[in-house]
Image (cartoon, rainbow, N blue to C red):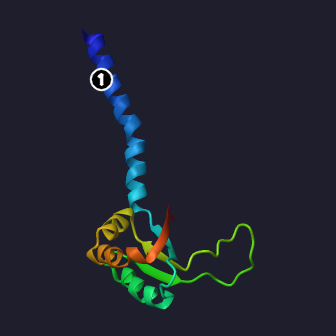
């Protein structure tokens, strides 16, 4: 009976030790700064400047730390360079939680509701720094 109890205690300690790195990694991932890049392919007839005026509200969302928006740069045409989009936004967040809050921010949701009919495609790239 005593050896069984020690065995179970050892399993419990080993299990807790095994989950500690996973929990620590998850906690650190939430504290990492995030970059959220959004590329828009607009439908024919949509005015780029008007769309950018609408999209500027995204940079005013409460948890956005920094916001940049622009159009494709006139760089050399190469196989690895994609100039096919019309507008790109780059948003910086201080944490994953801030980016999560942005996803449900009323201004963000209102932008999507008012403008999703203006793009034919949108592509998002998120990464931690």
* Observer-nearest of 124 and 12: 124
Asked if 24 appears above or below 48 in the picture, the reply is above
Q: Quadrant of residue 4?
A: top left
Query: For the image shown, how many numbered marks are present on the structure?
Result: 1
Q: Position of residue 34 (x, y in %)?
A: 45, 66
Query: Looking at the rendering, which quadrant does residue 53 occupy?
Result: bottom left
* Residue that extends furthest to the left in the rendered view of this protein: 1
Residue at point 44%, 63% (across, down): 32
Q: What x and y, as percent, mark residue 106?
A: 26, 75
The residue sitting at the front extreme is 45
Is any atom of residue 78 visible in this view?
A: yes
The residue most toward the top is 1
Q: Residue at left 39%, top 75%?
A: 117
Image side of residue 43 versus residue 108, left or right: right
Q: Is residue 120 above or below residue 48?
A: above
Q: Is residue 116 left or right of residue 73?
A: left
Callout 1: SS: helix
Taking 98 as reference, is 14 above or below it?
above
Give the residue number, with chain letter if any, for mark 1.
Answer: 9
Give the quadrant of the N terminus: top left
Give how far across and how far down residue 25 sits, in percent: 43, 50
- Given residues 79 and 16, the one toward you in this image is 79
Please give the name of the residue rendered at 45% of the width and 67% of the height, measured from the top-left corner: 33
Residue 37 in view, yes or no: no
């Amino acid at each position: 009976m005593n050896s069984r109890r020690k065995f179970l205690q050892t399993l419990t300690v080993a299990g807790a030790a095994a989950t500690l790195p996973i929990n620590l990694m998850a906690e650190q991932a939430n504290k990492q700064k995030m970059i959220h890049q959004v590329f828009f392919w607009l439908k024919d007839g949509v005015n780029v400047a008007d769309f950018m005026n609408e999209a500027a509200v995204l940079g005013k969302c409460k948890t956005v730390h920094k916001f940049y928006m622009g159009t494709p740069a006139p760089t050399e045409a190469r196989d690895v360079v994609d100039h096919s989009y019309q507008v790109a936004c780059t948003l910086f967040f201080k944490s994953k939680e801030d980016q999560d809050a942005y996803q449900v921010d009323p201004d963000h949701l209102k932008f999507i509701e008012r403008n999703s009919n203006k793009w034919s495609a949108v592509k998002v790239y998120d990464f931690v720094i």
